[in-house]
Image (cartoon, grey):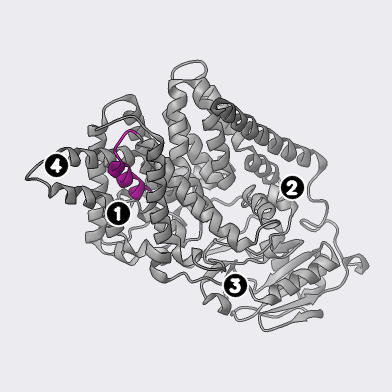
Amino acid sequence: MRRPVVGRDRLVDLAVGLVLAFLVLGPLLLGRGFWLFGDMVFVPSQPWKDAWLGLDGQLPRAVPMDALMSVLTAVVPGDLVQKAVLLGAFLAGAVGAGRLVGTYPWYARAAAITLFVWNPWVHERLLMGQWAILAGYLLLPWVAHAALRARRDLRDGTPPLAVALVLSAVCSPSSGLMAVLVALVLAARPTRAHVPVVLGTGLVANLPWLVPTLVAARGSAVTVSGIFEVFAPRAESAAGVWASLLSLGGTWKSAVVPPERTEALLVLLSCGLTVVALLGVRRAGRGSDERRLLVLGAVCLLLAVLPVLPGGTRVLEAVGGAVPGAAVLRDSQRFLAPAVLVLLPGIAAVASGLRARVRPGREALWGVVGLVVVAPVLLLPSLAWGAAGSLPRSSFPEEWGTVARVLEEEGPARTVVLPWRGSYRGYDWNDRRAVLDPAPRFLPGEVVIDDRTFVDGDVVPSEDPRVAAVDRALAAPDPAAALRAAGVRWVLVEHGMAGVGEVPEGTVRHEGEELTLLDLGDLADDPAHDAEAPGTGEASDTGDVVLVVLADVATLLLLSGNAAAILRRRV
């Protein structure tokens, strides 16, 4: 049932992806406004900050994705950027999945595309608001296709692999690491060139976040004690944690688990779909590509399940204590993402094999083929229409723009946001949905929030020394004076939430229903101001800035040079 790939196939895959993307994103796409929930934070216009490139000396968060969002929202309204990014990511994932199984007929490719973009992993990451990690996942078929191409011909496959690795690393550090893992497993050969080229390309692709992390880690404490247990995968139903993981679920955050995933029968049926796809891998062939995909799946499953294995968390904490960067392995269930690639040729082979059995008198098998295509949707209906309609659009109140203009007019200064407990907020204007505080991305200047993480009574401490300094200042007898000494000029109070506590005294520069902005006074006129307080000096020393800039330039050259090579081949 395999045949040559033609241009029309790409259009069919794009159409299938467009239908699925609209079924998921429809409520967002049909009007202006934002989806704001979990880590899903887009703002109308994100001001430029050194932190977006890791130039502020702090541990980088969304580097360099925040830099890209700042550039895009400078010319296009943020809500349109959000729509374009999410829709583009889903379409890229659909076309990439179709390309990975490109020699199969359209219905077999549709089965692979549906399984790839419609599964519990996608649902749970979307509801957690982890749009950048989701975008990195949706790029994985392109990484895999380029890696297999590079294994056959290193010169031919390296340019698309380099581009795919850079785009993955832009999405998030974990996305960059997953992409490198996929590239290594699928592209490596026992030659002198393949492994060094793939590793070197992956390293350069990840430099924009890797170098700032190494630079900032010298002055920051990265906590690993207890975090692997807190973020370990969990059972969603009575079927247990293994069944959850084998069916592509198992997130640590129980609040985002789809309602149907709490039923053991549906989880086991989803496991059955996984088993069917794995059996289909044997039908797809026993060549090197299939074997490597199976190895990739096994490695990713091991990474995901490691914290729940006997002694697994102790091993991870020991590694994290020696290598602080190993903290990226927390929330291990997200590293299950590349394992989905294993299932794509398998489910395509199953659909194709069923179609081959259709003959006069057995036309009913077409219905079974259709069932294979839509099975992921039937097993997870709540992903449809913005998680079953639970995600209406929102718009920021005008007060946010007013406060941003006041801060812009006064020039760079540090702002602290109250309430000071955790970084998630439930605003009335956003239907009380928990969302990462948008203040650091909405407001100009340095904005400090309490980024400790609270999970089921456990507290994951902040890695930012500024948070500890503000915490001490707010507990001082005179919070306003202590905050000024810590380099804080502004205090922003977000209304409508518990836990605000005592508000420091200051000049009211804005008072509204949603926000209050207090000016604690010009720090230059305050003799108590401690110039050595965390983050109050230069953003970073010159040597560190040079290292970070050189890293960004190297990655940009890798991207542009290989993109140009691809274009030259097509001319």
Which of discs 4 and 1 lies nearer the camera? The answer is 4
Q: Is residue 416 above or below residue 305?
A: below
Which residue is label 4 attached to? Answer: 358
Which of pointers 3 and 2 lies earlier in the amino acid sequence? 2
What residue lies at 52% left-to-right and 31% top-to-bottom?
161
Q: Amino acid at mark 4?
A: Val
Which of pointers 4 and 1 lies earlier in the amino acid sequence? 4
- Residue 505 at what x, y percent from top left? 79, 80
The picture quadrant where one finds residue 570 is: top right
Which of pointers 3 and 4 lies earlier in the amino acid sequence? 4
What residue lies at 48% left-to-right and 40% top-to-bottom?
178
The mark found on residue 376 in the picture is 1
Mark yes or no: residue 179 visible: yes
Which of pointers 2 and 4 lies earlier in the amino acid sequence? 2
**Alpha-carbon span between mark 3 and mark 1:** 33 Å
Which of pointers 2 and 1 lies earlier in the amino acid sequence? 2
- Residue 346 at what x, y percent from top left? 28, 39
What residue lies at 86% left-to-right and 73% top-to-bottom?
521
Crowd rating for badge 4 (residues with CA inside 10 Å; few <14, some 14–19, many 20+): some
The mark found on residue 395 in the picture is 3
- Residue 293 at what x, y percent from top left? 35, 34
Q: The magenta stretch spans which residues? A: 103-116
Residue contact between numbered discs 3 and 2, judged by CB atoms under 8 Å: no
